Amino acid sequence: MPHIVEMTEAEQEAAVERARSLAEEFDRVGAEHDRDNTFPYELSSLFKESGLAGLNVPKRFGGMGADIWTTARCVQELARGDAACALAFNMHIGVIGFFTGMWSEGDQKRFFPTVASDGDLFDGAYSEARAGVIGLADTLATPVDGGWKVNGKKTWGTLSLVADYHTFNVTITDPDGSVPDDPIERGAREVMMVCRSDADGVRIENTWDAMGMRATGTETVVFEDLFVPEGDLVATEFRGPLFANLEWQTLTFSSVYYGLARRAYEETKAAVIKKSSGPVQGAANVRAKDIGWVQRDLGNMRVLNETSAATIETTAKALIAGRDAEWGPVMRLGLLEVPKVVCTENALKVVDTGMRLLGGGSYRRGHILERLFRDARSGPFHPLTTDQTLEYVGMAELGLFDPPPAEA
Amino acid sequence: MPHIVEMTEAEQEAAVERARSLAEEFDRVGAEHDRDNTFPYELSSLFKESGLAGLNVPKRFGGMGADIWTTARCVQELARGDAACALAFNMHIGVIGFFTGMWSEGDQKRFFPTVASDGDLFDGAYSEARAGVIGLADTLATPVDGGWKVNGKKTWGTLSLVADYHTFNVTITDPDGSVPDDPIERGAREVMMVCRSDADGVRIENTWDAMGMRATGTETVVFEDLFVPEGDLVATEFRGPLFANLEWQTLTFSSVYYGLARRAYEETKAAVIKKSSGPVQGAANVRAKDIGWVQRDLGNMRVLNETSAATIETTAKALIAGRDAEWGPVMRLGLLEVPKVVCTENALKVVDTGMRLLGGGSYRRGHILERLFRDARSGPFHPLTTDQTLEYVGMAELGLFDPPPAEA
Amino acid sequence: MPHIVEMTEAEQEAAVERARSLAEEFDRVGAEHDRDNTFPYELSSLFKESGLAGLNVPKRFGGMGADIWTTARCVQELARGDAACALAFNMHIGVIGFFTGMWSEGDQKRFFPTVASDGDLFDGAYSEARAGVIGLADTLATPVDGGWKVNGKKTWGTLSLVADYHTFNVTITDPDGSVPDDPIERGAREVMMVCRSDADGVRIENTWDAMGMRATGTETVVFEDLFVPEGDLVATEFRGPLFANLEWQTLTFSSVYYGLARRAYEETKAAVIKKSSGPVQGAANVRAKDIGWVQRDLGNMRVLNETSAATIETTAKALIAGRDAEWGPVMRLGLLEVPKVVCTENALKVVDTGMRLLGGGSYRRGHILERLFRDARSGPFHPLTTDQTLEYVGMAELGLFDPPPAEA
Amino acid sequence: MPHIVEMTEAEQEAAVERARSLAEEFDRVGAEHDRDNTFPYELSSLFKESGLAGLNVPKRFGGMGADIWTTARCVQELARGDAACALAFNMHIGVIGFFTGMWSEGDQKRFFPTVASDGDLFDGAYSEARAGVIGLADTLATPVDGGWKVNGKKTWGTLSLVADYHTFNVTITDPDGSVPDDPIERGAREVMMVCRSDADGVRIENTWDAMGMRATGTETVVFEDLFVPEGDLVATEFRGPLFANLEWQTLTFSSVYYGLARRAYEETKAAVIKKSSGPVQGAANVRAKDIGWVQRDLGNMRVLNETSAATIETTAKALIAGRDAEWGPVMRLGLLEVPKVVCTENALKVVDTGMRLLGGGSYRRGHILERLFRDARSGPFHPLTTDQTLEYVGMAELGLFDPPPAEA
């Protein structure tokens, strides 16, 4: 999908400002939901009220019409408030982006207007226990009159607790419920469907309890004989089109981790400025900011963040300028992952350095660096993981994909 | 203090075997106390029963008489069971080691026999909020008839919940309660005292709630008008002698993190052997162990662990052989810290790699890698922190310590 | 200086194409001059003929009028041909950039037209043996009738062998030849002068023989009683204005190392594709490109290069958009250095990985990776070095510069 | 082979002292041979005179009888003098070690006495252009009356210019000169032979010209219809026994790079102590040793070296204590490589840091750090390379070797 800029510059700045303002609310509640492992339900209405549910819904459906770069900037602001809350609501923003590239104009017309007007929230439940999003869907849709019966379990269902609609990938079976053994044939059966979250046959299992990103409500979505009518099959191909629009995941996830790392930097800098030892062996006082390696390490944190920022901006602007046309479909996916790899890995380095500069106090719960460190740690796991990305890029460059992987 | 080997080889192996056996109990309860942030009180009696409370108490006082290398090996085994429980009880083992070098024969005779016979437990509360163990004690002992009145707060009081005795550093004031401004003079007033944990004027504040090492009971010890009789001043100099015997901290802490990293390696290896993807795009199955970079990364984890082990063994054996006599007092401290730096930093790399190899499942609470990762993260904070050690070694080598730092 | 875009898009592409074409000549001779430690004199006329001597000379003086981003792109192309040759001629391009910001309109009018028309070449001899460019100039200009007598030695004089003009920083003495002891006062005496390279009192000492970047002609420029007339003092302040225009160094140097790293990547990729073992223990053949960690490492090389590219592009475009106005003068310098740190450090990782993937053959002279590795190694030394940059950024952020460092 | 300690402690120290003394000669000539890419022929007689040619020849053959740990210590001393010269003569020491485990008592009796008495020098030409030592020998021995005709080319023939005897691996052909296609069958034909270096049909091709380690004389040994009599087949199996005795390569190579890194550290430390800036912007002088990150980085260099030392010592002493019996034949090889990986990789970090601390001057030829940096760079290429080792250890641990790799 070509990336169109619908917003004026003033509208772009206003959107970023709106995110910055909402981020204050994220900041206010993030620590508590991390501690209690609870979802920030109270943010749901604030998010809807802010209008950001329609952030990247095209203007023709009543949305704000934000382009990918403006969207990324908004997510960065939200994450500076609280990374976990931002990652939660970013799920909606990300999948809306996917849908603009994956759904027919008709389906967009059907669902997008109430996203823009009422703040209808979507999630994207595309992972399962066996092999994450990389595994072909074990959730099955068996043909029945007028649609399908769907059964299966989706893990990593971020935002599922407050989503009005779930979207999910599913494998269409033969009438007898069987699926082809051949992975190519089986992959060709994978489609995307949508359902209301309050439909019969849908429930949430509360399975989320992780090292960090605890406020994301990343629960398990369970389908038990859910009936999906024909019209709610919203993409006849799943995997190829998803990867062909992956910028909506990679650039927004990058922005979450870059926003997190900026916050970590700001907190570290403020604390270093204040930190001093008082009387120690041989000195009446040592100010942390006078120590040469503290200065250099803090400088390195900033350089890492600037580097992260550069990868997001360059990639977003290349997309808007249409330069991705030259990348080819295989390497396009690889290049879209570059900012995610850089931003998530740099965030790990930033929080690591921050904790070292602040010392043992930052290891205690309640210290913001302790939380940011745990949140940052989820970065390398979002598929394509760092390792998968590097391997993918290498294999692509070595000519080992033929035909390209993003084509079913 | 010269390091004497009192044990026969068979006794050494028996001690290690005893630790290995107790480690099974550590393993059984570690996860639960991590989750609940509780101290493993039930291990206290098991530890006493095992006889390991007297592990490194010299034989002449009824102890097992373990040398520093055997002690380190025992701690490694305990940490393979559970790192946090091991770090807790290692506090006792570590300070007993300190006392063999810092206390008079008379004081050893007074306290050690019941350590060996009854499992009396000691802790060492040598840190305060202001600047950790690096700060000169703000806890003050004001001279009174027959002794001192002590007031102050000790943070990072590992094992304090079950210690029978607290030992602590304290600054002796002028009769009017004042302390010298000059840091040299003030440092000269720092001594070590001991008190029963059930003495009047001693209480524990429950402040421990950290990212990891949650089962260590690292609470705050509060002294409020505690009377300490003259005889319970057990070291007239604190800082110099402590650093001159620091192997009992550095080599046992190294062993905790090396033991932790071995466990992480074993768990990762076992999981990689089992891990396979099932049907994915373009393949019916991918076994993790067939992936080239998985093999290499797992190999690297093992190499890191072997490297850690080598630093502990070489240093311990150098001490036993008396080769530290050639190091000089300043660099001796630096070289003692080498294993701690290597083992704690390598442990971080090992758990990081392990989680990457195992994927997002290891980010969930309840997965042992998730816990080991958080536990490992405390490694760089134990003073001398990694950064402080490197700086110290560099300054020592550049001739910037004159007179040497370990001399008051 | 605001960054103005004078070129049309077609002119920008034409300039890049011209650099790409000249790069083929660089490629043809680079290996030989590296081996012989000789300057590529033959490239001098080719460079002049190509018109690239006037690349970033403003159009009003007859130049091509390239903006900083187009300039950086051209340098990248040159460096893909040969990094050392590119670094040599980049000296001219870089100082022309400096002069557009540091020189009066009159001086530009005096010198720039023949740069554009005849390819007059400039260098910038701003370093001395004592402390590089960081040291205040020990080269002295003593007032005499109508000008100054200049004496001193400039090291690291890249391109000096073919420069038509040398520019240099110099400290103006009292009439008796003395300089103030106070570093602030002394710094205020530092100015920039220009001289013809064939003037009396100027000679080159052949001192250049380094690990890499051997074709750069980085010789020593010696001034012995050189008379500089008043009009050839081209900047009454040296250091502040130089740092205020440092993008012409940092972004072009970044481009040299990014271009180098791209070349290293391309060569590595091509060689990996071809590499296979033939019969080894237990296998008839192993193709390098089928090994998982080879794929991942090659992918990482590409990701590193993309990251480098992003930092240059983002910074250059921020300058053109005038966003540096928000950075403040102190942090502006720090942010300008970010691409240089990232590109030079990433280049080191790229050549290191490349050599590991290709094996011992790449350690032999004559293998292009061997040369690129040595060339890359100069990256961290260009002032501000990597360490100096990180320290500078940290100190700036901690508020330790007051007044800002770039103001005399 | 069990490792026997034949030397008294005094003899061990005397051997180390002899190496230290010879190292002064290495130091005297190393720079010049690096510059000129010449072999240090003059060291050959000094090495023979020193008696170190017989260093690890068993006492029963007249040798000094050095164990593996004493041998490693001697090599460390030689490398502190000059790494390239040490690597050259270490080839002889290493293969003598191999032969003690690979050759029959009869063959040892035949060749070792003159090694001890006259300093006969051996090399081991076990690599070829196709795939290094990993590739099955393409050098072929065709059966003829009373022996074989040998034809082939051995690359990486360190020390070959002065060796009195070459040893080499070779594949025995069918009488018609053909070899089996099956790699297992072909591998079973690989044997070790020995020949005098002045035999008909042996010559050296001067091919050595590399980034570093230039004084090693690592030329190509060419066999053209060389007749090898039956008795000079000294090992009927090559690969398995070689790997089963690999400690003689891994621990001595480790020692070369550790010795190199110690020298780099000593030179850096001495230079940092002296380095100061003189007048710079805003300061009359800055001493390098007062900069916090310089102190920390220098400290890190020392810690890296101590870590390297620990891996050599621990492994050597484990071998002497016979603890390798518990390792199993597959992992034994992996564990033997640990010191080589650690020491070579740490050496790279040490020389990198050293150059950064010393600045651009260390990039110039003639500066010892420049040479040590290039020499260190060969470390990762010695087979098993770092990457091969990590992969090997991982595969071994994952149970992927069955039967073990070191068994034909």
Image (spheres, coloured by chain):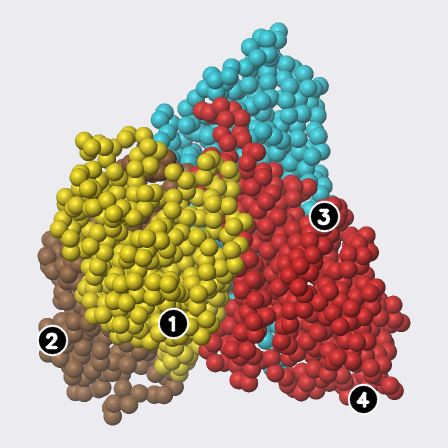
Chain colours: A red, B cyan, C yellow, D brown
- Name the front one of labels 1 and 3: 1
Q: Name the element at disc 1.
A: helix
The chain letter under disc 3 is A
Residue D402 in sight here: no
Quarter of the figure with the N terminus of chain A = bottom right
Q: Residue at x 15, y 56 (%)?
A: C198
What label does residue A24 carry, if any? 3
Q: Are marks 4 and 3 in contact (CB under 8 Å)?
A: no
- Residue B40: horizontal and vertical position, in percent? 70, 41
Q: Which residue position is annotated with label 2? A: D199
The chain letter under disc 2 is D
Q: How busy is the neighbourhood of tag 4: few (under 14 within 10 Å), some, or many (20 plus)? A: few
Q: Earlier in the sequence, mark 4 or mark 3?
A: 3
Q: Residue at x 62, y 64 (%)?
A: A69
Q: Name the element at disc 4.
A: loop
- Discs 1 and 3 carry the same chain letter: no
Q: Which residue position is annotated with label 4? A: A175
Pick the front one: A315 or D292: A315
Q: Type of residue at label 4? A: Pro
Q: Which residue position is annotated with label 1? A: C15
Q: Type of residue at label 3? A: Glu
- Discs 2 and 4 carry the same chain letter: no
Q: Name the element at disc 3.
A: helix
Q: Are marks 4 and 1 in contact (CB under 8 Å)?
A: no
The chain letter under disc 4 is A
